[in-house]
């Protein structure tokens, strides 16, 4: 499979099992962008003295937005039957949206220095929690009425 220079296999636009871009592939692509943004934000926070003490949330955002998103995408790539369900697509999009809203909302609160209540981080964290709950349903297929067959490695 020729992907071209610098184009990773999981971000290819090639048709796989009838879908132009499976949710697992999309989640993996978005995760690396979120991780890069999180790393750059961490560097900026480390350089600026007034933001240095606020670097701790960046670790959580990288975990929630980047690492978990990548692992979910990897699961859907390894168990393709699970990644083709409507529930998996809903879970993927929920986690993508939540992984963007959650850190953005907290960043706004930190930059405003808590002058007033912002619902952005609360909504973002609730969306990520809902996505995680959906993933639990997907991983335990007997409970969800879903039968998945893992690929042979």
Image (tube, helix red, strand yellow):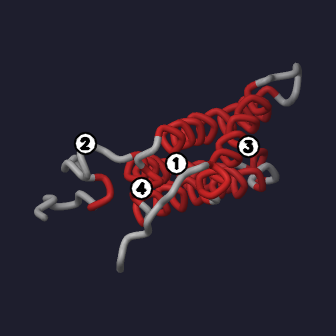
Where does the C terminus fall, quadrant-wise?
Answer: bottom left
**Left or right, residue 88 beside residue 24:** right
Q: Which mark is residue 34?
A: 1
The residue singled out by tag 2 in the image is 20
Out of 147 and 13, give the one closest to the viewer.
147
Residue sitting at 52 percent across and 48 percent down?
A: 34
Out of 32 and 74, give the one closest to the viewer.
74
141 in relation to 113, above or below: below
Mark 3 and mark 4: span between their CA atoms?
Answer: 23 Å
Residue sitting at 67 percent across and 53 percent down?
A: 143
The reply to whether discs 3 and 2 touch (Cβ–Cβ < 8 Å) is no
Q: Tag 2 or tag 3, which sits nearer the N-term? A: 2
Q: Position of residue 94 (x, y in %)?
A: 58, 36
User: What is the secondary structure assignment of the residue under circle 3?
Assistant: helix
Q: Tag 4 or tag 2, which sits nearer the N-term? A: 2
Q: Nearer the viewer, mark 3 or mark 4?
A: 4
Q: Tag 2 or tag 1, which sits nearer the N-term? A: 2
Q: Position of residue 50 (x, y in %)?
A: 78, 45
Q: How crowded is the residue under tag 2: few (<14 C-alpha within 10 Å), some, or many (20+)? A: few
Q: Tag 1 or tag 4, which sits nearer the N-term? A: 1
Q: Nearer the viewer, mark 2 or mark 4?
A: 4
Mark 1 and mark 2: span between their CA atoms?
Answer: 22 Å
Out of 31 and 109, give the one closest to the viewer.
31
The residue singled out by tag 4 in the image is 81
Q: Nearer the viewer, mark 1 or mark 3?
A: 3
The residue singled out by tag 3 in the image is 129
């Amino acid at each position: 499979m020729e992907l071209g220079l610098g184009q990773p296999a999981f971000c290819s636009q090639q048709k796989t099992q009838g879908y132009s871009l499976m949710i697992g592939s999309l989640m993996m692509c978005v995760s690396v962008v979120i991780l890069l943004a999180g790393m750059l934000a961490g560097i900026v926070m480390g350089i600026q003295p007034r933001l240095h003490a606020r670097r701790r949330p960046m670790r959580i955002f990288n975990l929630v937005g980047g690492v978990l998103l990548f692992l979910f995408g990897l699961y859907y790539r390894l168990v393709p039957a699970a990644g083709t369900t409507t529930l998996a697509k809903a879970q993927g999009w929920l986690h993508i949206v939540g992984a963007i809203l959650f850190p953005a909302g907290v960043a706004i609160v930190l930059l405003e220095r808590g002058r007033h209540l912002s619902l952005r981080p609360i909504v973002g964290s609730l969306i990520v929690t809902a996505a995680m709950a959906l993933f639990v349903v997907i991983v335990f297929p007997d409970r969800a009425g879903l039968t998945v067959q893992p690929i042979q490695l």
